[in-house]
Amino acid sequence: MKIRTRYAPSPTGRMHVGNLRTALYAYLIAKHEGGDFLLRIEDTDQVRQVEGAVDIINRTLADTGLIPDESPDKDGGVGPYVQSERVKAGIYDRYAKELIEKGEAYYCFCDAERLASLTQVVDGKEISVYDKHCLHLSKEEVEEKLAAGLPHVIRQNNPQEGTTSFHDELYGDIEVENKELDDMILIKSDGYPTYNFANVVDDHLMGITHVVRGNEYISSTPKYNRLYEAFGWEVPAYIHCPLIMGEDKKKLSKRSGHSSYEDLIEQGFLPEAVVNFIALLGWSPDSNEEIFSLEQLVKEFDYKRIGRSPAVFDYTKLRWMNGEYLKAMDAETFYQGAEKYLKEAITKDLDLRHIAELCHTRIEIWPDIPDMVDFFEKVPDYDISMYTHKKSKTNPEIALKILEEELPLLEAQDDFTNDALFAMLKSYSAEKGIKINTALWPVRTAVSGKAVTPAGASEIMEILGKEESLARVRAAIEKLKAES
């Protein structure tokens, strides 16, 4: 049997990391076995819809390489792939009425006031369990109310005795008491199906063999199974993925600042790094490898290695992983990505490609660049304590002496290339009987004003040029004289 999975998002805004992981796992499960991956838009909650959200879904899937085999734009013969269009086609209404005829569902005319009276507090939480009041209406009463145009919903008729069990590929066999199964609404008063009903009908009609979703849906699964059984349909394999938590051990929320795919892209992460990282939020490979292309993930992915414990979104690890992807880039691709960040920090006519080369192996995300290179534009205000370096055996007093001795050598230097400058400073250190680092530290601090730079003194001066380098060294000497 060919595996068919689906990603069925609601168009309610940016794609949450958890939703992207669901899409990724569904894609990998299908592609690992040569199956099909479908995209279905579940827009039955008209109130929560956000304009442009479908475009976000399509763009995110395209950016991450999760290309559906069937979708609203690629009909595979089981469309429409948008639930509101399926509503118009009468699909859900037809199947809901079939359940009513079988006694597996019923019309409910209870108003908001009566429903509110059913609310009770259990373990500090308000819950509402429907009491099957309308199940006992006669056929004539129902027809009379429908003819009068009274607002109504259609509810599932769940048993109150016995148990219902189902199998999850990760959690095993799960059994629940039927008295815990509320008569959930299948068709709302606006004529639209609920998520719970529509996804069962659509998954069956679209031939979905494996349902991938978050484990928050485990408690609803018995109700879904009862629908499958009521229709006489084959139950799909269930794969309920673990919760994704923030580093505070709470469910990853918008407050984290990185809960959606677009948040991460805006923060300078690469799509392929995000996909790699999210794949490991709950799944572990059969090796110690951590860097995987999408093609490698397809080959390696075994859904039985998805864990059941909550996965922690380790932002530091994501930064590291993204840095590995940046390091692996060729120079031209890296420059294309880095250019706008370089130009944010540097307006002077300097060799940006050379500066990009300096950053290539030193950054983890694109926005690291401006703070790393802004000294090329202007030396920041700094404290002269920066000239103190135990390993290089320097302090402000020693640095002043060294800079005053190096200045005339720099002024006399015609060849301001990296190699020539380094050779000159190395010769100076040998002549003075000091370590080369002792000679370099003061001048690097003088021309950069930073404790950490992407290059050494001679390479920085090559990029700045002779005039600017000399001006910075002279300014440093005056600063040391004034503040020592």
Image: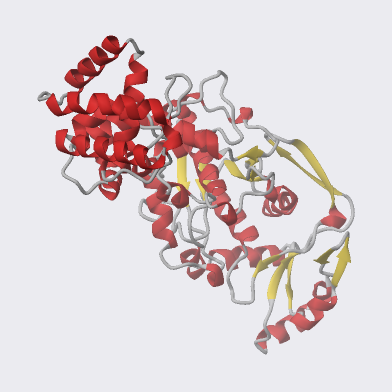
Q: In this view, does 189 lie above or below 416?
A: below
Scheme of colours in the image: secondary structure
Would residue 79 be visible to someone looking at this image?
yes
**Residue 227 placement (x, y as % from top left):** 69, 54
Query: The C terminus appears in which quarter of the rendering?
Result: top left
From the viewer's side, name the closer residue of 334 and 407. 407
Q: Residue visible at 26% across and 31% down?
A: 460
State the image coordinates of residue 217 (x, y, percent, origin top left): 68, 50
Q: Position of residue 404 (x, y in %)?
A: 27, 28
63 or 106, which is in the foreground? 63
* Residue 234 visible in the picture: no
Q: Toward the viewer: 329 or 101?
A: 329
> Is residue 108 rendered to the left or right of residue 176?
left
Q: Nearer the viewer, residue 102 or 292?
A: 292
Q: Is residue 13 left or right of residue 189?
A: left
Residue found farthest to the left: 414
Q: Using residue 436 as the reference point, say whether residue 28 is left or right of it.
A: right
The residue located at (85%, 48%) in the rendering is: 163
